[in-house]
Amino acid sequence: MVISELAAGFANILTPFNMVVFIGALILGMLSGAIPGMNGTMTVVLLIPLTYVMDPVTGIMMLAVIYAGAVYAGSLSAILFRVPGAPEAIMTTLDGYPMNQQGKLREAISTAVFCSAFGGIVGTLFLIFFSPMLSQWAYQISSAEFFAVILLGLALISTVGSGNVPKATMMMAGGVFIGVIGLDPMTARTRFTFGSNILMSGINFIPVILGVFALSEVFKQVQDNDQMVGGGGDGDSGIDMDEVKGGGIFPPINYIKRFSRILGLNSVFGTLIGVLPGAGATTGALFGYTFGQRIVPEKIRKQFGTGVPEGVAAPETANNAAASGAFVPLLTLGIPGSATTAVILAAFILHGIRPGPGMIQQQSELVYTIFAALLLANVGILLANKLIVRSFIKVRHIPEPLLLSLIAMFAAIGAYATRTIVFDLWVMLVSGVGGYFLEKYNYPIAPLVIGLVLGPLAEPSLRRAVIKSQGDFMVFLTRPISAVLVVLAALAFFIPLFQDTELGQRVVDKLFGSPEVKS
């Protein structure tokens, strides 16, 4: 039954008009993800009116493909310029950009494209064969379990900041604080707004991300103007640009062996994160990076953040799997799994379709065309990657002053376009200056972003769980799933504090085995 429905979905896509739409959507999605300041959500929003003149199957298929392409392509600008092209590529900057500076641009991009496609394909297969079961699982997750999942994500910052856990914890707490500014989600009362109407809507995380990653890097390059953005240009970085543009589409076969643990675990883990309503691919990337750091050999674990391929593979596998997983609650419960699927939900409603428990049976043609499109999109990422990279890589030949100006301009456009208020430009500027000095004094930026993204997700779940239990905080320990997650969160946070005694490594080896170093 599933196979025949899926075959019908492929047949829908392979009609001449739908195939043209599919190819155009994939290229547009990849370009929107690769351009700093743009993202898939913004592109989907802009194209919703276009779907009104299309058949619902064609229009919604187009939006799904744009989303899949943008989630991958955000890694391009993250690797090239340390500017996440999309929020889902935040964690890819941590190792992708250092690899670029070390002259490993081709390896970084090959790793990103292979792991993105793998994670996306696995996530889509889970979506196709296990949607009803996954939707029931997501439906049964209470506020206590959801908070425990987010708590585990926050606790994993000790891995990201393993060189200095107190600094990482301070940065994470700062991110959580920034995230709670604005209106209380439960009572709608103002918090930390100091009487400012602008702050009532809170501080959007996209201007902060663009500031601490993109603008701070511009400041750094301006100070050290003898280095070209992206590693010193062709001559200084030692990168053979002809090799980058002329290399094969597929990475070496030993990637599968080297990243086997990351590919296997993060693709499943990322899908499950994506299934959680509201989590999305950005949360999947945050979890994927920190979880990936836990399951690699200790020798590689200590190099995370300095430019190792595993640091690119982990978030790229998880975020693309989560992007597919985000369609599960959308199609089976009518609840968007991410910001982009929330916009796609609006497209469903525009066409008079209301996703819900019976949608797979009632709208099987539409649903399985989306499934087939997501599978083809992830295969297309591999096939179209060489052309996109060849075009995009040429920006490295732009003179340094102009390129720095373009990066700052795109960052400003992205910061402003999110909510179209000037205040976000000031947020980006302050974040850029702050990020520059924080890095100068060795404060990790990633925990700040993790706190900023996950904090606002954790608070409503925490408060709802406590309200439902009539103020009893033991609810997090009396429910089996949340209890296990809380214990794992405690272990994840405290083990790095005494890793010098090798106790943390022994616990990890007990849980996941003792992996050998892959070459």
Image (spheres, helix red, strand yellow):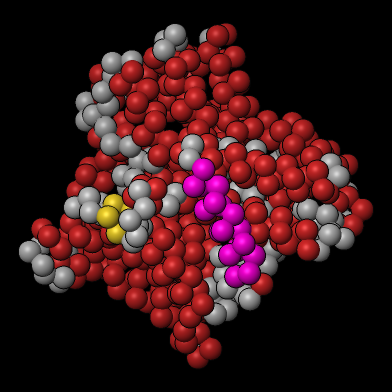
Furthest-bottom residue in this view? 501
Q: Residue at x 33, y 65 (%)?
A: 151
Q: Residue 192: x, y in percent? A: 33, 61
Residue 406 visible somewhere in the drawing: yes
Q: Main secondary structure of the magenta part?
A: helix
Compared with 257, 340 (above or below) is: above
Q: Is residue 434 magenta?
A: yes
Report the magenta residues as a range.
422-439
Q: Residue at x 23, y 69 (%)?
A: 483
Compared with 334, 338 (above or below) is: below
Q: Residue at x 43, y 81 (%)?
A: 495
Compared with 95, 63 (above or below) is: above
Q: Say which quarter of the image contains residue 52.
A: top left
Q: Nearer the viewer, residue 423 or 237?
A: 423
In the displayed structure, does residue 213 sit left or right of residue 464?
right
In the displayed structure, does residue 480 sit left or right of residue 285?
left
Furthest-left residue in this view? 470
Q: Residue 361: x, y in percent? A: 25, 22
In the displayed structure, does residue 495 sit left or right of residue 483?
right
Residue 301 visible somewhere in the drawing: no
Furthest-front residue in this view? 195
Q: Residue 2: x, y in percent? A: 35, 26
